[in-house]
Amino acid sequence: MLKQMVLCGKYVSGLIKGGLMPVPKRRHSHSRKNKRRSQFKLNPLNYIECPKCHTPKLPHRVCPNCGNYKDVLVVPPKEEKEKT
């Protein structure tokens, strides 16, 4: 009965449509796993100095301290609230 289902294509199409995933034929060794995972790491953030106020900021972003981007005021700086 299994041969009939395979021959007519119903069994094969059911496997493909059913969403079965491929399974590895052999086990990966510890060294192979670790070599693959060696590239999966966090890179340090690259801070640059703001040309106006000289505070560190992320590149290609508005300075959070002075609000400038490429020597143009984009966001006006917030005024500090006085404590009363």
Image: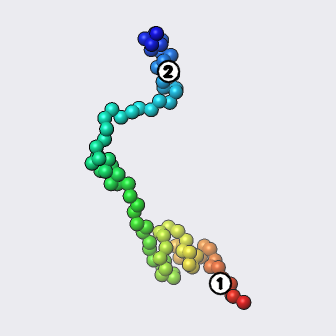
Residue 42, picture quadrant: bottom left
Q: Amino acid at mark 2?
A: Ser
Q: Residue at left 49%, top 21%?
A: 13
Task: Give the residue pinned by disc 2.
Answer: 13
Return the mark for residue 80.
1
Is label 2 in a helix, a strand or a loop?
A: helix
Mark 1–mark 2 Cα distance, whole angstroms, equals: 67 Å
Residue 60: % across, % down: 50, 67
Q: Is residue 33 above or below residue 7?
A: below
Q: Is residue 45 above or below residue 20?
A: below
Quarter of the picture holding the C terminus: bottom right
Residue 63: % across, % down: 54, 74
Is label 1 in a helix, a strand or a loop?
A: loop
Residue 30 shown left or right of residue 42 in the figure: left
Q: Residue at left 35%, top 51%?
A: 37
Please give the count of numbered marks on the rendered protein.
2
Q: Residue at left 42%, top 69%?
A: 46
The one of 76 and 70 positioned closer to us in this rendering? 76
Q: Is residue 77 above or below residue 1?
A: below
Residue 35: % across, % down: 30, 50
Circle 1 crowding by C-alpha within 10 Å: few under 14, some 14–19, many from 20: few
Q: Amino acid at mark 1?
A: Glu
Q: Residue at left 44%, top 74%?
A: 48
Visible in this render: residue 7? no
